[in-house]
Amino acid sequence: DKILVTCECAPNIALIKYWGKLNEELIIPLNGSISITLDRDVLSSKTSLILLKTNNRNIQITLNNKTQVFNEGDLSKNSNDIINKKRFFTMLNKVRQNCILSDPFEYEIKIKSSNNFPTACGLASSASGFAALAHCLSKAYGYKGDVSELARLGSGSACRSCFGGFVKWTTGENSFDSLASRLFPSNHWEEMNIIALILEDGKKSVSSTHGMKESVQTSDLLKERVKIVENERLLNMENFVREKNFDEFARLVVQDSNTFHAVCLDTYPPLFYMNDKSKEIVKFVHEYNNLDSSLKLAYSFDAGPNCFLFVLDQHLNELLFLLRNIYFRNFDLKDKVVSNNLSKKE
Ligand code: DP6
């Protein structure tokens, strides 16, 4: 009469980004994307779910010590909502309609989730959070479908956090074929390091969900980006990672991040996610790379000012030295997370 499951998932950072939906309700993207999932030991969302056979049909959700209780099917929007209820119920109903439990609607649901990193630090926690929730729901109910489809219904980028290592999410036309799958395990490229530079903590910007909707409606550049991603970039990125060709990999990561931010600027009214500090980092990376004939460092920015750097082992110490002792001396660096993920377990 009681089912308890726990799951832990890590955030992922897109190398080829998702920006724009073909279908808003089902969260089907206009283009495929490729990401790396970070190391769970460094950053993760841990979620536990309890199903209780009682007469009560309440749903209780606790996120980082904030609790909210709501009723089955309650879609009312509240300013203090800690979860998007509509997306939550889409996930829940999907599971309950295709599971091994004979009485899936007969349970009270209690969910508790927390991040091992401050939500205010500005790192996307929704991907890891929804991926962990999807895994919990899937295990608790004995879901017969694909767990990445479930996670996607919570938040698009979350479907990629269902797996470790290098992950690809393909567009698809229907809900059941817009899925994420692993391209390569994390130990495929053991020398790879990801450094998250937290330049701004918790400052509110336009949400990804809202921002990409505006871009789809107003940006012509977005249409061009979708084509080039689908026709070239996804395949190229997969090959560069397969061959562990850092030079080409770095160029493409940087290019795709920049094209994404160009689309943001082409959106009307424009979306500014990178700030002056972000641009300083961009300048620093290009100066650093210019010292050598091949690239040593790549950057990528999501819908916020914080930066992800990609660097191989052989240059890691030199880079950290530069960042700590020279570069960040005159920088108000709030925090810095080093995720040396790719040689570790998933
Ligand atoms: C810039 O997955 O947060 O991080 O599907 O509406 O929940 P929804 O959006 P979300 O968008 C992430 C956008 C991005 C790029 C990426 O992760 O691919």
Image: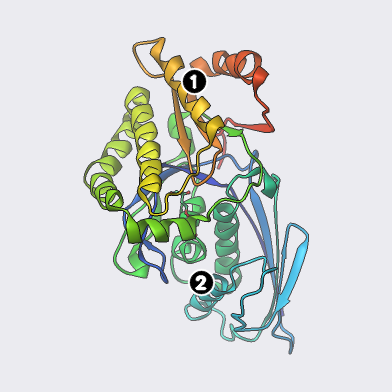
The image shows residue 294, relative to residue 98, as above or below, that is above
Q: Residues within 10 Å of mark 2 (few under 14, many from 20)?
A: many
Where is residue 187 shown, x and y percent of the image?
Answer: 48, 34
Residue type at tag 1: Phe
Q: Is mark 1 within 8 Å of ligand 1?
A: no
Q: Is residue 95 above or below residue 212?
A: below
Marks 2 and 1 sit apart, C-alpha to C-alpha, by: 47 Å
Residue at disc 2, secondary structure: loop
Which residue is depicted at the point 53% across and 54% down?
Answer: 206
Asked whether, in this view, residue 78 is left or right of residue 306, the answer is right
Q: Percent position (x, y) of residue 24? A: 40, 68
Q: Nearer the viewer, residue 97 or 216?
A: 216
Q: Provide the secondary structure element on which disc 1 rests.
A: helix
Which residue extends farthest front? 269
Q: Nearer the viewer, residue 344 or 220?
A: 220
* Mark carried by residue 139: none
Q: How is the image coloured?
A: rainbow
Q: Position of residue 12 (x, y in %)?
A: 51, 45
Q: How many marks?
A: 2
Q: Which is more N-terminal, label 1 or label 2?
A: 2
Q: Is residue 75 left or right of residue 184?
A: right
Q: Which mark is residue 284?
A: 1
The C terminus sits in image quarter: top right
Residue at 41 percent across and 16 percent down: it is: 289
Q: Amino acid at mark 2?
A: Tyr
**Residue at (56%, 30%) from the top-left corner?**
277
Image position of 193 with respect to 15: above or below: above
User: Which quarter of the image is occupied by the N terminus?
Assistant: bottom right
Q: Residue at x 55, y 67 (%)?
A: 138
Identify the residue under disc 2. Answer: 143
Direction from residue 250 to residue 133 in the image, left or right: right
